[in-house]
Image (cartoon, grey):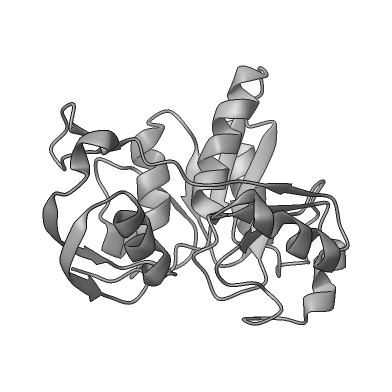
């Protein structure tokens, strides 16, 4: 699972979605990530109860916390990391979070994520022509179906299109939270540290929230 742009396209949520789909199909997946910004080095199996985001990276820790029995590991050398995780965890398939550019490792399928708010032909980490290596392109965060023809005309690969639908405001400590429909006209101060903070702010405004102050941090910000 990867992208051509700088981040914020929805790679990690897609990994989590595919974990659920693979398990429902009777498969035994594992997840491997570089562990962006982690303080540790080499290969490390992620333990959500024992590790911090600083040690293993925020996204691998998030995945491990959501799926306590899922084998999750971090390793900058994806080939070595994949080999070790496969040997010690008995997995039958492997999902790689942000590995489109790591071509030393064999892959059966390349899924490239594209943020509809930041088309890859405007914001690239490698030439747009590289999208031809993708088996599937997933365009995320569509504001309307009217955007679909624009992307279909530019993307030379099979593609599908998704939009975000807010469900609820969930408290950090757990609990039922507040349904999205009940947030309209609420006054709030909001913040985020994402690959695309502007899209999150637009989402809040689209829900009818009155955002009196919005604070943007860099992606993977350490609060």
> 140 or 41, which lies in front?
140
Q: Is residue 105 above or below residue 17?
A: below
> 112 or 182, which lies in front?
182
Q: Left or right: where does residue 151 sit relative to residue 45?
A: right
At 59% across and 23% down in the image, what residue appears?
23
Q: Left or right: where does residue 18 sit relative to residue 47?
A: right
Residue 112, visible in the rendered structure: no
Q: Position of residue 183 (x, y in %)?
A: 20, 42
Residue 43, visible in the rendered structure: yes
Quadrant assignment for the C terminus = bottom left
Q: Position of residue 89 (x, y in %)?
A: 56, 34
Q: Is residue 104 above or below residue 129?
A: above
> 34 or 12, which lies in front?
12
Q: Position of residue 114 (x, y in %)?
A: 64, 62
At 28% across and 75% down in the image, what residue appears?
217
At 30% across and 58% down in the image, what residue appears?
205
Q: Is residue 33 above or below residue 92?
A: below
Q: Left or right: where does residue 33 sit relative to residue 57?
A: right
């Amino acid at each position: 699972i990867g992208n051509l742009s700088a981040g914020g396209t929805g790679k990690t949520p897609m990994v989590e979605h595919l974990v659920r789909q693979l398990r429902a199909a009777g498969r035994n997946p594992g997840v491997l990530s570089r562990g962006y910004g982690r303080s540790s080095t080499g290969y490390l199996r992620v333990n959500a109860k024992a590790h911090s985001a600083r040690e293993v990276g925020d996204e691998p820790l998030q995945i491990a916390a959501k799926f306590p029995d899922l084998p999750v590991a971090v390793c900058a050398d994806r080939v070595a990391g994949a080999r070790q995780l496969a040997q010690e965890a008995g997995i039958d398939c492997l999902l790689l979070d942000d590995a489109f550019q790591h071509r030393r490792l064999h892959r059966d399928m390349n899924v490239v994520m594209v943020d509809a708010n930041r088309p890859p032909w405007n914001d690239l980490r490698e030439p747009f022509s590289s999208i031809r290596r993708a088996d599937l392109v997933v365009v995320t965060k569509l504001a309307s179906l009217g955007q679909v023809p624009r992307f279909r005309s530019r993307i030379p690969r099979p593609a599908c299109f998704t939009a975000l639908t807010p469900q609820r405001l969930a408290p950090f400590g757990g609990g039922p939270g507040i349904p999205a429909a009940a947030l309209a006209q609420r006054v709030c101060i909001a913040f985020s540290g994402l690959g695309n903070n502007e899209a999150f702010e637009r989402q809040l405004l689209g829900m009818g929230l009155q955002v009196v102050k919005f604070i943007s941090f860099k992606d993977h910000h350490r609060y």
